[in-house]
Amino acid sequence: MRIVQAVFGVFHHFELARELHRRGHLEKIYSTWPWARLKREGLPHEKVETFPWLHTPDFLLHRIGLNPRWLSDNLGYQTALTFDRWTDRRLPACDALIAISGAGLKTGQHLQARGGKFICDRGSTHQRYQAEMNREEGLRWGLDTNTSASSNNCVDCSCGWPSGRGRSAKAKSSRLRSRRALRSSCGA
């Protein structure tokens, strides 16, 4: 099986890529970081291609404090769209594409149209869901959970996930009952 990966930066994808390479399945991995950063990940240079032109400047501007929110949001959005188009243009023959969420929408659609498999990899739950779970568990254990990750401070990413403001009490109650039932069924 020939597998291609696409990732913003590194995350857990390079660990997977090393294992796929060891087993002879890695065709290529595409990243938005430069090779200077990626060479320490332990893959041969010919297996890695980089598109650092937007993500790296965004990261560096943020690091020195010259990246206002509006610019960072715009660069992040443009990075996702441009990286996807760039990846799509150079996608080699493969059986599957594993892309971190947001990195391969069009590329994945085109691969599926050719009979390949597209795996959209999300390494964690949505930011607002995480914040809400942390808040609820904090309440359950009597801990102070006022953090900057609270659901009211999250970025509105337009994904459709409720922001916490204006959510009906019925929806909250139903979700809490579901989670409590899950906890009791798993022994937590």
Image (cartoon, rainbow, N blue to C red):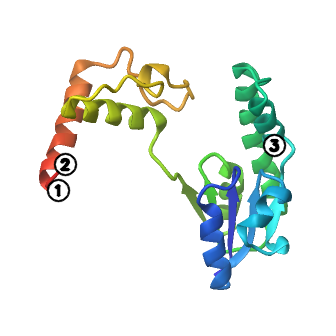
Quarter of the picture holding the N terminus: bottom right
* Residue at x 69% of width, y 21% of height: 69
Q: In this view, does 132 lie to the left or right of 35?
A: left
Mark 3 vs mark 1, foreground winner is 3
Q: Label 3 vs label 1: CA separation?
A: 43 Å
In this rendering, is residue 124 above or below 164?
below
Residue contact at pointers 1 and 2, CB within 8 angstroms: yes
* Residue at x 65% of width, y 74% of height: 18
- Dot 1 falls on a residue whose secondary structure is helix
Residue contact at pointers 3 and 2, CB within 8 angstroms: no
* Residue at x 13% of width, y 54% of height: 185
Say which residue label 2 marks. Answer: 182
In this rendering, is residue 25 above or below 81?
below
In this rendering, is residue 18 above or below 97?
below
Residue 45, x across and y down, in percent: 84, 71
Q: Label 3 vs label 2: CA separation?
A: 42 Å
Relative to the observer, which residue lies in front, 124 or 157? 124
Say which residue label 3 marks. Answer: 56
Labels in figure, total? 3
Say which residue label 1 marks. Answer: 186
- Dot 3 falls on a residue whose secondary structure is helix
Q: Residues within 10 Å of mark 2 (few under 14, many from 20)?
A: few
